[in-house]
Amino acid sequence: MTMPDQDSCDLVVVGSGAAGLAAAVTAAWLGLDVVVIEKEPVLGGTSAWSGGWLWIPRNPLARAAGIDEDPARPRDYLRHELGNRYDARFVDMFLAQGPRMVSFFTAHTALSFIAGNTIPDFHGGSPGAALGGRSVCAAPFDGRKLGPRIKDLRPPLQEISPFGMGIAAGDDLRHFLGATFSLASFRHVAMRLVRHWRDVALNGRGMHLVNGNALVAALLKSADDLKVRIMTATPAHGLVREGAAVVGVSAAHDGRSVTIRARRGVVLAAGGFPHDTARKAELFAHAPTGTEHWSAAPAGNTGDGLRLGESAGGAVGRDLAASGAWAPVSLVPRPDGTTGHFPHLIERAKPGLIAVRRDGRRFTNEADSYHDMMTALFAATPKGEAPEAWLVCDHRFQRRYGLGHARPRPFALGRWLASGYLKRGTTVEQLAEACGIDPSGLVETLAVHNHHAAQGRDPLFHRGESAYNRVQGEPHHPLNPSVGPILDGPFYAVKIVAGSLGTFAGLATDEHARVLGPDHRPIAGLYAVGNDMASIMGGNYPSGGITLGPAMTFGFIAAHHASGTPLPQDPDRPSSTPEPGHAL
């Protein structure tokens, strides 16, 4: 689609991740003329690479399954988890509108959800924590429904998608891990591969979309159905202002400067700053030059939305428990000479793996959340040292679960050993020497670990005692789903470095997602959602999906405010909205 040098609409959305598309789709349903501009040639941002999970307490899928918890419980959990960063305005708005957002998209768009009713919160010992019923995920989506738009969808992250094929959490992943051990799993995987390669031959990519790819695809289908205009390769350069009010965006498109006037405002949803070197140097203590951090988010997320907001008088919040959604990452050498960033989200909780620093000592419960693991590594790293560690396992583990990008049986290991990504030693001492780990420290650590693991115990870090640890582990493993000995060589290790899934430090807003100016009053016509909005969790990470859940909820909220439509109040109705396209 080409764009004239001057254009106008009701609402401009900068960025095409789940937050921006949620705002665009909701606003279009409410009758607004919406334009989405995306700097990249593909759509979906970090959301398209995500697991597609949203943390939405008291969501309609849970309630339909009979999980109808007291509204005070998730509020108690957040009050404990967020501490002095708990802000009732944002928490109350999120808890009220999150379920209504899910109902709205389920009833009125192409997006469907599946329940995560057995997924526990990260910190089961905290007051108000739940064993499930607070998560939903985008349902698998047939990419053929997108028609020509499929070419614009960002493919899944190649480091975690064999042959470009997304693998969903739960049964799908269990079948892939068990394909060489179970006939039923082998059949499942064989059918998935046949379907995938058929789709690649016919369409150039897989069409069975899962996780974040399915979430974005369904939102794109909904946007197209509602006549949202979507412009790729169109970076925003500035905001158009009249006095203090924001009334549009200036951007580049097809080598030309274009201006898009927006009668109802501009929504910033450009994905935060995971690849903004200067901002990382300012806000990440472990990255003093901004280059000592390796995010798994797309390289195009360079803080554009934050700079646009600051140009209009907005401010980036800094009083956070953490400025990023930390995750252990390993650096993957690619055939083209570039380096991929593999997020270690799955294998750490499986029995038969530990993480050690260069002294050979463990420093945390490896089965805890990715954010908690990196927080522990930062705390354990002496000042002046890089926060690095090694994931260590034996041959049985590597062939069963894989280790980082070195995938399990039947994938070969030669490429990863030759590149140095995967280290191997016939003995523990040889592995330690290959990695630069203190051999005596690693030998002693493994001896202690194996002694207790034989009894299914981890007295040092209590691994496998929480519901979250057990769900992430191996359900059929005896004694403890997350704890197992590391016994039989050869032994393997992969180095992990400081990384993230995204950023938490964003523009200060009010509870309607309006960006606040120097006087702490809303800037007329300017909204920020997703990772461009300061984390309502205060930089804490209480559960999986606490990025996408608030992102889509506040996109939904911002659209209602921009359209002048009251937010829905009945939790059992999807939205008190007009029919699509009706005048307001």
Image (cartoon, grey):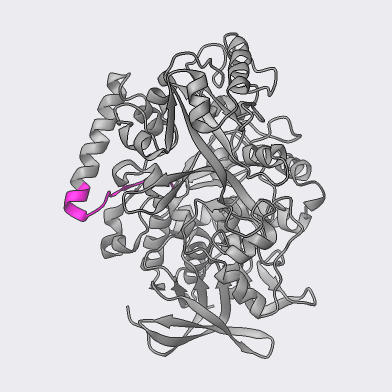
Query: In the image, is residue 239 above or below residue 444?
Result: below
At 56% from the left edge and 19% from the top edge, which residue is drawn?
483
Name the residue nearer the viewer: 577 or 520. Answer: 520
Name the residue nearer the viewer: 249 or 142. Answer: 249
Name the residue nearer the viewer: 454 or 108. Answer: 454
Asked whether residue 392 is in view, the answer is no
In the displayed structure image, the side of residue 31 where residue 408 appears, left or right: left
Residue 282, how many percent across, how many down?
A: 68, 62
Query: In the image, is residue 49 above or below residue 449?
Result: below
In the displayed structure image, the side of residue 407 where residue 113 appears, left or right: right
In the displayed structure image, the side of residue 138 where residue 146 appears, left or right: left
Query: Which quarter of the figure has residue 396?
Result: top left
Query: Which quarter of the figure has residue 479?
Result: top right
Residue 148, how many percent across, how many down?
A: 26, 64
At 63% from the left edge and 53% from the top edge, which residue is drawn?
324
At 68% from the left edge and 31% from the top edge, which residue is drawn?
124
Residue 319, how many percent across, how many down?
A: 77, 58
Name the residue nearer the viewer: 330 or 110. Answer: 330
The span picked out in magenta is: 199-212
Q: Is residue 84 on the magenta stretch?
A: no
